[in-house]
Image (spheres, coloured by chain):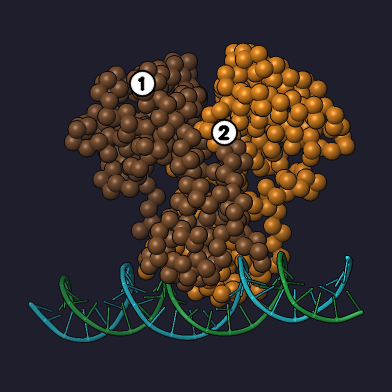
Chain colours: A brown, B orange, C cyan, D green
DNA sequence: TGGTTAGAGTGGTAAGACCAGTTAGGAATA
DNA sequence: TATTCCTAACTGGTCTTACCACTCTAACCA
């Protein structure tokens, strides 16, 4: 009853947060259910109450729980359209398939490419060329992480070049899903050979300020994935979400050399 | 130097969070800048260190700061495409215009309508009819809040009916902006008279499982706004929302989260 | 029976202490 | 003088104890 997915004697604060979030996302604690009290959680996990409280604050901020003074903390229902939900939460629930993701990306990124053709600056253009040049110069077999990171960076650059903050926001909110999908695509020879060149088609259209061509090129790019994914189309995205390209120091270094620096205080 | 937008003698923990967030969102503290230490903040604001720490955890969760043990907390650069950014943050920065929002909504909701036509369930249909019937039965002059809420609810129902969690996620992430825009549209007689009936066109197409017609009807709906907004098209969403802050509770809530209506008591 | 109330439980806050990692400046060195 | 090294003063991370306001429940009394 009081077993929260793992026995006692844990360690850090981060692991506590992960445990609690996992317990909620796996529906071990269902919506509306009351969490154990802060004192009880502290006791169960062998940490102090302030640590528990800080973890609860983060869960609260993620929209996973609501806290009522004097009563307790309660699991909230995860509702994608009510705001606050993150892509990770949806993926963990297992409802997101590649079919869903590709359809959404096709919509979003085709529009982004079209708007980029209209609004791109010369600086946008330079950066995109640098990314694609870097992508050509790196062997996929040698360093798949870097390749995937550059691929995502190109799509991100398109979103930035659109000049539309709402488009950029939407891309940012599914960014981790895109990273996962790019990893999946990298392992597919046909997708690599035919997909990567289309990047150039998109970029050329953006350079020429041809919105129609840019939209079509980006749509082609994602239609290719649609055709090649086969049985994976209806597979949950969760299976490939683990990888996190942003955490790679080498990629961060490469991207910094490529242009804009990743805002790192130092 | 140590003046954080307000002198000492504050009050609750929520107000501390609001103050800190506001100080960051107004760029009083710029990206990369180091925040005062936890002990210093506790001293400045007259609260205890745990309160400061919990506030910092929430800022961290919102992606506004990064924390380095032994060094301090640092303001992060708000980057829409890097994930974690919220619509409120973007609006507060003043970069989002109705032109941006309408373009994004046209893209998103046209696709949502098309997918809804393909994937809607009978339950979806019932709910959408109920919403539109309720909308017809309520006088706009009497209760604008309810009307606006129902309007948003219809668009939300379309997103839900699409059956695509990624689409739903995107809608949820711009939901508050949609609410603001609907309020703006409610005050426009031409928009009301011609816009509301188009809801029926969308719903009929969804009912008939005609994806093409549904996409077009939704696009028409938003194109109408595009044509009618006039000079407001290139006005920041935040500024237009400001005017009606007093009489609209839900909007006031949005603005409060954004930190605008915080009448700074000395 | 029905209303009141006391107590236990909950989250909210405060204060003080210790730890581990970081940083900067002074002392010792070459 | 220039360099290296080390200490002391930070920083955030954690623990402990204590008290407050609020909520709920159950025993109590009228």
Give coordinates of residue B83: x percent, y percent.
Answer: 47, 43
For the point 40% across and 30% down, the residue is A235
Numbered circle sitting on residue A222: none
Depth check: give the residue in front, A242 or A95: A95
The kind of secondary structure element at disc 2 is helix
How many labels, in total? 2
Could you tell me which quadrant the C terminus of chain A lies in? Answer: bottom left
As measured in the structure, the alpha-carbon distance from the residue carrying label 2 to the one carrying label 1 is 24 Å
Horizontally, is B260 left or right of B86 in the view?
right
Give coordinates of residue B238: x percent, y percent.
Answer: 66, 42
- The chain under label 2 reads B
- The chain under label 1 reads A
Horizontally, is B260 left or right of A143 in the view?
right
Neighbour tally class for label 2: few under 14, some 14-19, many 20 plus, Cα within 10 Å: many
| Residue labelled with disc 2 | B168
Q: Can you see residue A109?
A: no
Location of residue A241 (image quadrant): top left
The kind of secondary structure element at disc 1 is helix
For the point 52% across and 68% down, the residue is A40
């Amino acid at each position: 009853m009081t077993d929260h997915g793992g026995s006692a004697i844990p360690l850090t604060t981060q692991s506590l947060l992960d445990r609690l979030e996992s317990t909620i996302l796996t529906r071990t604690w269902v919506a509306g259910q009351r969490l154990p009290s802060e004192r009880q959680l502290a006791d169960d996990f062998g940490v102090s109450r302030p640590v528990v409280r800080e973890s609860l604050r983060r869960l609260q901020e993620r929209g996973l729980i609501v806290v009522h003074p004097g009563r307790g903390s309660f699991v909230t229902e995860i509702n994608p359209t009510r705001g606050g939900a993150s892509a990770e939460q949806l993926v963990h629930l297992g409802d997101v398939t590649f079919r869903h993701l590709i359809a959404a990306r096709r919509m979003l990124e085709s529009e982004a490419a079209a708007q980029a053709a209209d609004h791109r600056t010369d600086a946008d253009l330079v950066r995109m060329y640098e990314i694609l040049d870097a992508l050509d110069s790196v062997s996929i077999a040698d360093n798949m992480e870097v390749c995937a990171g550059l691929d995502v960076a190109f799509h991100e650059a398109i979103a930035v070049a659109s000049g539309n903050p709402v488009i950029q926001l939407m891309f940012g909110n599914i960014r981790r899903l895109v990273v996962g999908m790019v990893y999946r695509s990298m392992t597919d020879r046909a997708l690599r050979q035919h997909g990567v060149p289309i990047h150039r088609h998109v970029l050329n259209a953006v350079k020429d300020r041809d919105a129609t061509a840019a939209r079509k090129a980006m749509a082609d790019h994602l239609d290719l994935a649609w055709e090649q994914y086969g049985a994976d189309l209806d597979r949950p995205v969760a299976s490939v979400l683990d990888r996190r390209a942003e955490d790679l120091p080498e990629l961060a270094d490469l991207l910094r050399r490529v242009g804009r620096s990743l805002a790192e205080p130092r």
